[in-house]
Amino acid sequence: MAPVESLNPDQDMWHWIAVELRFWRERAGLSLSAMSKIMGCNKAHVSNVEHGRPTHRMNEHHAKAVDQYFGLGEHFQRLVRYARSGHDPDWFRAHVIYEQRASVLKIYEAQVIPGLLQTPDYARALLRAGRADDVEAWANRRIERQAVLTRKRDRPEVWVILSQNALDWPVGGPAVMREQLARLLDLDHLPNVTVRVLPRSVGEHVALEGSFKVITIAEGDVIYMEACGGGRTTMDAAEVSERRIRFDRIGADALTRGQSRDLIRRTMESYDDAVA
């Protein structure tokens, strides 16, 4: 069996699942179509799983069906559980692919302005602080992703809730922050973008546990969660449900759209003296 190019099962659990699935399928002389009937999905999905593509993962139902067919106990089910709980080295590519395919994006950000809303100078300041290997290249990639907000067809509906911390943490200095907050106000006037602020006056809140996104694509909802040194994406039904509820709870305590604009504008104006 020739290996699928670029798969690295020694470092990526999802690649291990891809290699294992292909091994057992070909060992039994099964076609992709036959395997798709066992797993309860289409042939293209099986192929994509075997190629380790981040937009197509084996879920618990697929894993159970494969285990039962081959008499493997809980072999694939355990692999899927470990893959979901571990760090995915391909997390960023998966996140960007989901983001570009989204019909709805719900973003909560606890500390900084989200990448989709950042100005170039704000992005550069964060990347320099994070010691990126090529600040300009990474900043350009981040800005290029923002085209999803204004593309001519199939723009996603984007709902953003920012912690007040993101408004007045002086990333890049006063001039950079003033430009960044002005950018937020401009984006909030797009018909598909809504920006709201969770004020510090709320006090202790479930929002303090960290930033996340709920990304709606054709196959369902995907959760992206930030972590130190990386991130994680999952379509696990329980996690999806929990994060959707969490976003709604945060939204219930956030300022209205008009109140949020006023706070952003006041914070922006607070940088005027320093800029002058």
Image (tube, rainbow, N blue to C red):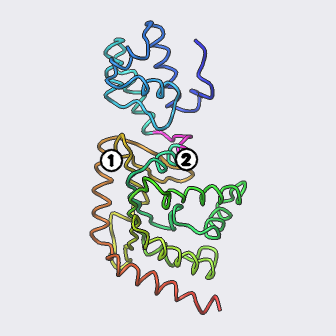
Image height check: is 159 above or below 164?
above
Check if residue 88 falls in the magenta segment: yes
Image height check: is 256 above or below 147?
below
Which residue is outermost to the front? 152
> For the residue carrying disc 2, how many other residues have a C-alpha within 10 Å: few (<14), some (14-19), or many (20+)?
some
Under circle 1, the secondary element is helix
Image height check: is 152 above or below 61?
below
Q: Amino acid at mark 1?
A: Val
Residues in magenta?
86-93
- Quadrant in which the N terminus appears: top right
Mark 1, residue position: 240
Q: Residue at x 31, y 58 (%)?
A: 246
Residue 23, image x, y percentages? 50, 14
Mark 2, residue position: 92
Quarter occupied by residue 171: bottom right
Q: Residue at x 40, y 84 (%)?
A: 262
Q: What count of labels does the image hold?
A: 2
Q: Residue at x 46, y 84 (%)?
A: 265
Left or right: where 9 falls relative to 39 = right
